[in-house]
Image (cartoon, helix red, strand yellow):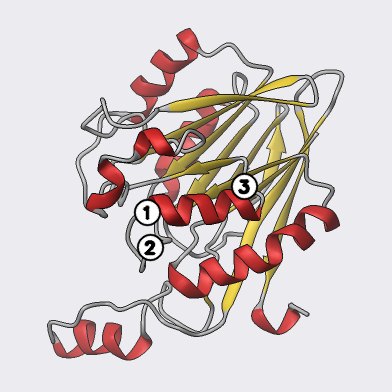
Amino acid sequence: MNILFLGDVVARSGRDAVISYLPQIKKQYSADFTIINGENSAHGKGITSKIYRQLKEAGADVITLGNHTFSKSEIIGNFSQCPDMIRPANLEPADIGKPYIIRECRGRRIAVVNLLGTVFMDIAAGDPVTAMNSLLQEIDADIIIVDLHAEATSEKQVFYHIFRSRVTAVIGTHTHVQTADEQVTDGCAYITDAGMCGPFDSILGRDTDEVIRRMVYREQTRFTPSDKPAVICGILIRTDDATNRCISAERIQIRPEMRV
Ligand code: FE2
């Protein structure tokens, strides 16, 4: 089984790149199942039901979120129209959206879990380890993929070491910078951050000039998303059809100039 995961889609630049290029990536990597983190897809913060539909039509099977899950008010009342989207399991309010999802693919049950980290995050969330232990009591699946949306590398590594014998992949998101530490140990894949699908010549997807003015000169800028061409970042997880355990993890990074 080939499972494609694309990191945080950032604003129009990232959306346009993913929507136009995803079919080609899926074909190139023979992806059976595709997960996309869409938490920055609506102008850099949150998602809307329209963007959800666009990502689904482009080929996403499941869409995960993060600390900006509820940033767009439109989505709060429309989660029921987005059946393949999940929100962090340890984020309040717990009664909006699903904390995990199970979908069937090639005769296997794939569970996708979304969790928030708690270290250096700008939003209060419950302990992800406690939440994952609780979810594992009820999840009945052959393959379990976790999108751990968190800032601190240490928190993501701690989580991986605790759960790697019980899940298939722990994929970090949120920092927007892809890390080169992908590994497969005990049949479980890990990467600290899958990276973003968003403006490459930018500061984490934001307009470079605005971020510099804020950080250096303390101006109250808006952190508008950059409109520069997007890099597409993610990871391909391959599982053994006999054991359902992970056998390889391959980083994907397609810079604007590499797209045809
Ligand atoms: Fe985030």
Q: In which quarter of the image is residue 252?
A: bottom right
> Where residue 205 sits in the image (x, y, percent)?
43, 74
Q: Look at mark 3 in the image and give the residue it sits on.
A: 60
Measured along the vertical axis of the image, is residue 223 above or below residue 216? above
Measured along the vertical axis of the image, is residue 98 above or below residue 8? above
Kind of residue sitting beneath label 1: Thr
User: How many neighbours does mark 2 have within 10 angstroms: few (below 14), some (14-19), or many (20 or more)?
Assistant: many
Q: Looking at the image, which residue is at 75% across and 58% down? A: 23
Q: Counting residues from the N terminus, which is met first, the one under dot 1 or under dot 3?
A: 1
Does the beta carbon of the residue at mark 3 sit less than 8 Å from ligand 1? no
Residue 48: give its label: 1
- Quarter of the image containing the N terminus? top right
> Where residue 33 sits in the image (x, y, percent)?
71, 39
Distance from the alpha carbon under mark 3 to that under mark 2: 16 Å
Q: In this view, does 35 lie to the left or right of 219?
A: right
Instruction: Pick the residue in front: 35 or 254.
Output: 35
> Where residue 239 sits in the image (x, y, percent)?
79, 32
Kind of residue sitting beneath label 2: Ala
| CB-based contact (under 8 Å), mark 2 and mark 1 | yes
Q: Look at mark 2 in the image and give the residue it sits on.
A: 42
Does the beta carbon of the residue at mark 2 sit less than 8 Å from ligand 1? no
- Quarter of the rendered structure image containing ligand 1: bottom left
Q: Is residue 209 left or right of residue 138?
A: left
Q: Looking at the image, which residue is at 38% across and 33% down? A: 80
- Asked if one can make out residue 193 in the rendered structure from this viewpoint, the answer is no
Q: Counting residues from the N terminus, which is met first, the one under dot 3 or under dot 2?
A: 2
| CB-based contact (under 8 Å), mark 1 and mark 3 | no
Measured along the vertical axis of the image, is residue 101 above or below residue 17? above
Label 2 sits on a secondary structure element that is loop
